[in-house]
Amino acid sequence: MLKCYIKARSNMKHHVKLRKPLMKQLKKGNVKGIFVHSQPIWVRIFHWGFALSLTGVIFSGLQLHKPASFLALNFSKVLTTHLVFCWLAMGFLAIRITDALLRRDDSLIPRIQDLKHFPQLMAYYFFLRSSPPPSRKYNSGQLIIYTSWLLLFLVSSLLGLASYWQGEHLIWVWKAVGGFQVIRWIKFIASIYFLTTIPLHIYLSVTEDISRLQAMVTGYERKPSPNNR
């Protein structure tokens, strides 16, 4: 019995000795890379806040455009919900713009060099090349999508205010666009564009580099260690 106990203790010590080097390697990041802080707190607040708000804007807007009879929702309550989500989305966008100005962050502004890499990026996505082209913090496809979202959201917000005030204010918007029905259809097309591109964004975020998605939660992204590059 005593021999069995001594043998078990020696095996335990041997097991601990084996694990110590492994723990040191994990702490140093030698196994799977190093963690780099890539997404500040205000960027993450904007990302998730704007995502939830925009989702509410799109689905409540579609319900206002063509009410689904099987839902039996009160029109005034849906309109109130839509307005609340709109103001929240604009507030989160204001936070992101303010943060970018304070930190002098131009990572979301497309450059000519970024656009030149777009054909190569499409070739990579369609499995015509083995590796993606060089990019900054965001690749050319992301920059194009993000810029289109920003412009489309600002235009839709302006049209939404014009339709909400029904000609009492922003009359020049009514005259420039061509009336209330044209405004409704532009906002509807914008909603379809968002519904088409957002799932694509989610798919690429999950399948391309999961550490990028992790950075939007924790702020830290796993990068290859310098020795493994």
Image (spheres, grey):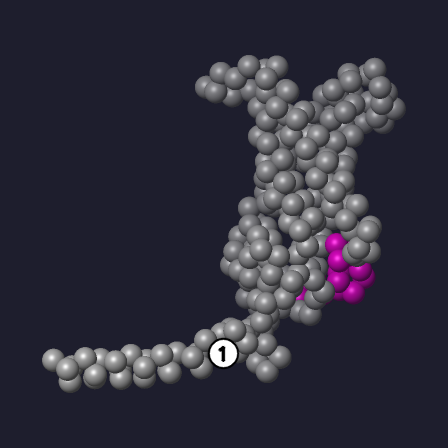
Position of 121 with respect to 17 (left or right) is: right
Q: Residue at x 75, y 58 (%)?
A: 107
Residue numbers of the magenta segment: 107-120
Q: Residue at x 32, y 84 (%)?
A: 14
Q: Residue at x 78, y 51 (%)?
A: 100
Position of 136 with respect to 35 (left or right) is: right
Q: Quadrant of the N terminus?
A: bottom left
One can see residue 221 in this view: yes
Magenta-colored stretch includes residue 114: yes
Q: Which residue is mark 1?
A: 25
Q: Quadrant of the C terminus?
A: bottom right
Q: Quadrant of residue 108?
A: bottom right
Please provide percent x and percent y for residue 66: 58, 21
Say above or below: 83 vs 24.
above
Please provide percent x and percent y for residue 58: 61, 32
Find the residue positioned furthest to the left: 1
Please provide percent x and percent y for residue 45: 65, 45
One can see residue 129 in this view: no
Q: Secondary structure at mark 1?
A: helix
* Mark 1 residue type: Gln
Please provide percent x and percent y for residue 63: 57, 24
Q: Quadrant of residue 212?
A: bottom right
Say above or below: 134 vs 9.
above
Say above or below: 204 vs 98.
below
Front residue of this view, candidates 189 and 140: 140
